[in-house]
Image (cartoon, rainbow, N blue to C red):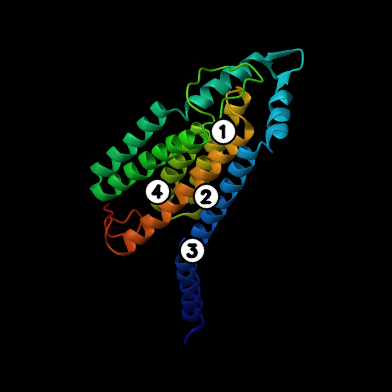
Amino acid sequence: MPLRTLSTFVTTLRARSAAELAPFAVLALAAAMLALFGKIADEVLDGQTHAFDEAVLRALRNPADPADPLGPPWLEHVMRDITSLGSFTVVALVTLGAIGYLLMDGKRLAAVFVLFAVAGGGLLSEALKLVFARPRPELVAHLVDVQTASFPSGHAMLSAVAFLTLGALLARVQSRRRLKAYLIFVAIALTILIGASRIYLGVHWPTDVMGGWCAGAAWAMGCWVLANWLQSRGSMEQTDANGPANRV
């Protein structure tokens, strides 16, 4: 066998092995996120996180005025804008836009799956809030209006569910690794910024946001594994750039 042919064969084999192992690695990471969520939830229920939560919220406010967040005035406005990206309205609009694109591209089952992934994650977030029923922090003034329970953070969880799911979907239609990495990075960065804004605005304890990140990431990764399995069985259209359902 010529050296060039052998090298191509080895490269192809490695790429195929990595693709086959990826779902197992993602599933293991999702399980780790669930385990971390369980640990955080257990400590929240036992009151073991109170000192940490309180210290972080106090550190982000003026010691002389708990209603005054640290930083210049414009930073508060920026945080209000960022936090709105994780609201139900914005996430719903982004999700509907993605679903519309998939429907126009002839990927009806993929569109249904995206709706299931995001809507299911949102319903799970609300169910968890009802189960834990943790009160919102009253240690500092709330800089935005809130009405629901505190744990887990709905903004943190919903943004993780929606943006990680859509980021992974967009990454699958790219053949260049640099673009794939960029899309995933943007999805993760948005999720982190939205969660951090909830703490800065005083409407969530830090552990609320951490729990939301863990639960949302676990749900998104579980959906990614399920989507791969359905596509391998031919039960859902391929979204990969080289998949049979794609057209020029």
Mark with earlier residue (3, 4): 3
Which of labels 2 and 4 is toward the front? 4
Q: Residues within 10 Å of mark 1 (few under 14, many from 20)?
A: many
Secondary-structure class at tag 4: helix
Mark carried by residue 24:
3
- Amino acid carrying mark 3 in the image: Phe
Q: Nearer the viewer, residue 110 or 12?
A: 110
From the viewer's perspective, is residue 116 above or below residue 21?
A: above
Cα distance between the residues tagged 2 and 4:
12 Å
Q: Residues within 10 Å of mark 4 (few under 14, many from 20)?
A: many
3 and 4 marks in contact (CB < 8 Å): no
3 and 2 marks in contact (CB < 8 Å): no
Q: Nearer the viewer, residue 124 or 210?
A: 124
2 and 1 marks in contact (CB < 8 Å): no
Mark carried by residue 195:
1
Which of labels 3 and 2 is toward the front? 3
Q: Where does label 2 land, which residue? A: 181
3 and 1 marks in contact (CB < 8 Å): no
From the viewer's perspective, is residue 186 above or below residue 177?
A: above
1 and 4 marks in contact (CB < 8 Å): no
Q: Where does label 4 land, which residue? A: 169
Secondary-structure class at tag 1: helix
Residue 69 at what x, y percent from top left?
Answer: 67, 18
Mark with earlier residue (1, 4): 4
Cα distance between the residues tagged 3 and 2:
19 Å
Residue 210 at what x, y percent from top left?
Answer: 59, 39
